[in-house]
Amino acid sequence: MARDYIVVGVEIGTSKVCAVVGEGRETGPIKPLGIGCSPSRGVRKGEVIDYETAQRCLREAIQEAGGKADVDIRSVFLGVTGSHLESYSNRGVINLPDDRDEIDETDYEDVEVSARDVVIPQTNTFLHSIPQGYYVDGHDGVLNPIGMLGRRLEADFHLIHGVTTRMRNSIRCVKELDLEVEEVAFNGWMAAQMVLTPDERDLGALAIDIGGGTIDYVLYIDGVVRQSGVLAVGGDHITNDLSMGLRIPMARAERLKIDEGSAMPGRNDLIHLKADAGFAGAEIEREMLDTIIHCRMEEALQLVRRTLEKEAWLEMLGGGIVLTGGGSQLRGLVELAEDVFDQPVRLAFEPGMSKAVADDPKFSAVMGLLYFGRDFYANQPEETGLLGKLGRIFRR
Amino acid sequence: MIDLSTRRQFTQPLTYRIVGFGGAGLQVLDRLLQAGAAPALLVAADTDRRLLEGAKAGERILLGCVSTGGLGTGGDPEVGRASLEENRSELHRAVEGNQLVILLGGLGGGTASGALAAAAREAKEAGAMVMAAVTLPFTFEGKRRLAQADAALAELEQAVDLLLCFENDRMGEGVSPSAGIGEAFTEADRVMAGSVSAVLDLLEGTGLIHLGYADLKAALPGLRARTLFGFGIAEGSNRPFDALARALRNPLMDKGRMLEECDAVLAQVTGGPEMTLHEVELLMEELQRHVGEGTQVIFGASASSRMAGWMSLTLLASARLPSVEPESVVAFAPPQAQELTVFAEEEQAEDLEELAPMEAAVSHPVETPAMAFVEEEAITEEPQEPEQEQVPEEEPAKRENQGRRKPREERPEDGNELFSMLEVRIGRQSEEPSEELEEEPQAAEEPEAEAPEPEVNAAEVAVTPEPQHAEPQNDPAPSARKVPTQGTLKFEPIARGRFEKSEPTIVDGQDLDIPTYLRRNIRIRLRN
């Protein structure tokens, strides 16, 4: 029986706080019903630093989204990011008990536990264990081990973990608004799932989500996540650099970046900034503007490249690189990324292609959350279905 | 003069005295006693008779009995200075015959501020290498004390071989806001005592991977460098991370930000016998993230039963000070030079332990046996002489050098690159010292002119991993020779704009919150 799912995704980002209500079936696209978005304050580098302010922004966004979708939002899926997130891949191994040789659900869970059996700082907890591949009695290429016969099950996982308290700050922010947090997910992964086609993932592709406070990246090779990471540098840094370098107020720097900025210096003409309250106006050489942006973004992309170079994965990117996030709208960024990575680069969504929420790079992560949430509900046991879980989140 | 060569250390353990000056110094001595230091190695010196009577050190010197009547200095460094003059000979006797003298004190008051620098010079005259560990006062202690501390620090820097300097203000950050004021001071004493015993452990201990004075010195290339020190100790299952976090939380580390500027970082890990390789691995991996890519990590490990259940990390490094002529240096040092250095350094690190001459970290870095005696005589007579007055001493060396260099300039390797101080040092340590002698002062003063010379040396080191070490052994303790020009500690704010108060983003030792163009030294033209 096909079920309709109503899913709410929330992202407390550095530049914006947004909530999206979406509706979809077990498979197929999810239709956004309503979106609430308010400029974010009290968040730096993807993490809440001013609790009350951030909560106020979140409340506005939730109310707006709920109102537009005509849904009383009770529970949400929350996207998190931040420099504290770390990841690595590890293999879990279990041997089946002597009296059984069919792999079942419990073995599947055990092998995941076994993969997580590595030393991470005590302060951290695991956010995701993303399966990469299974081996039954040493044979690889197993897509779903459940039901197979074997004595030994091994599985590779990509594990993402982060500092517990820092993740709980965002969760608490939501919970205090009397909302349930169903599940927490890494923004970068959500965005990557949203913007990379299955073909690209199979060929090997890198998704880079350039946000206000962080750059989140996820690398797919052979259809599975091989590497992920967060660089706590984002659009905010560009604005800050511009404000400091050109000696203009932060708000003007932000405007200037969006209206005129480019990551590839070329032209040199003068940009006139009109006087404003508390600002005498200024003339700015475009070359300087673009140089500052270029330096920052080039460095950031180089840092991403360097983390990937350790494993020669860049050679395996048949699907190229996909840029998304609000920061990806920066002019010249695709050219810059091509220079840095020496790989074909595309934008997840061509600017001006569509006005739909689903096609706005800013909302890649939160849209990805909707799919993540939908799959989460779909995998829930039936009995909690309509009556239980849905009843809780979805009351008109 | 002492010879601190490791060869001698094999037969004879390091001898040292720890001298605490003033109230803070005595407190730290007490801490060290609690930590198990032998009272006989400790000397308490104070102008306050009452405080001194309470001290448990093996030897006590009442400074300025006549001038202060044993009532303290009243916070006046001049009184402290005069008091030391009175009891100079007693101090001399107390430290005589030791290889290392460690001076402790809290700057800002009268006793330590006035007496430490003079005491350091006295200890040097007594033939010891001198290390000082001092605290700077809390800001709330008032401007006068801060100014006194500042002046004393500047003087002290010129007089010691190794300086560990702690800001009380920063150490206060490690104390919970609700803690009493006593706890803040205690924390400061604790950090200082911890660091002193860590350095001693390093120097006298024997480790699984042993680090000795040579490594200490390698981590502290000396001239124009500031010393960074971090010490962290932790127990429990998370101890590698906690120990590192605590080490980085030490004031001088600035949460690890300072490490990015270092050429070399010395890391000594000490743990109980149960310490696993994995733990060490975790710790070192984590540490690597805080240092720059080219930074050499000199690593040592030791296990001892008295550390059972605990793990400690000692970090010691020196950061380059902004050079006098940074642009010219950069311009003359192409990337190949850097790589070569790392190679040479590795060689050196291996050899140093047994073989390297034991020059003091901050000493005048060059010597031939022959020249050294001449120079040394001159300098031991007046060890406090400011640097400029030594210039005439160097003149003949330079001239001789000009003549000698001619044939070498024909070598193909010549004339390519300029080496920084560190690189020069490497070349010197591994090559025949006679040839190097003259290079050093000039390299410091006129980088362009001397550029080709050190390059040759380092290149040769890279090719010949077995340098000649016999000669440097004859070298009389150079620590007493040239007054070290350890730079002043600068804590100027770094421009981070709106990220000023947020947690820094450090990747490969770079603070990414500082605009990239600033870090890359790109000049921004402004129209108005």
Image (spheres, rainbow, N blue to C red):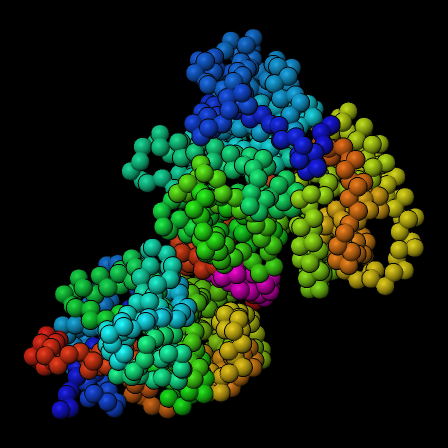
Q: Nearer the viewer, residue A384 or B26?
A: A384
Q: Nearer the viewer, residue B106 or A326?
A: B106
Q: Which residue lies at the image location 32% right of the left edge and 71% below the top edge?
A: A95
Residue B331: image location, x then y, percent: 71, 61
Q: Which residue lies at the image location 52% right of the left edge and 28% below the top edge?
A: B105
Q: Is residue B509 magenta?
A: yes
Q: Nearer the viewer, residue B191 or B105?
A: B191
On screen, residue B300 versus residue A99, left or right, reads right
Q: Is residue B418 visible?
A: no
Task: Report the span colored magenta.
Answer: B507-525
Image quarter in which the N terminus of chain A is found: bottom left
Q: Is residue B60 visible?
A: yes
Q: Is residue A55 magenta?
A: no
**Vertical relation: A384 (above or below) B244:** below
On screen, residue B117 versus residue A29, left or right, reads right
On screen, residue B76 versus residue A34, left or right, reads right
On screen, residue B387 versus residue B300, left or right, reads right
To which quarter of the image does residue A3 belong? bottom left
Residue B52: image location, x then y, percent: 47, 16
Residue A261: image location, x then y, percent: 48, 76
Residue B75: image location, x then y, percent: 49, 21
Q: Which residue lies at the image location 66% right of the left edge and 54% below the top edge?
A: B346
To which quarter of the image does residue A362 belong? bottom left
To which quarter of the image does residue A201 belong? bottom left
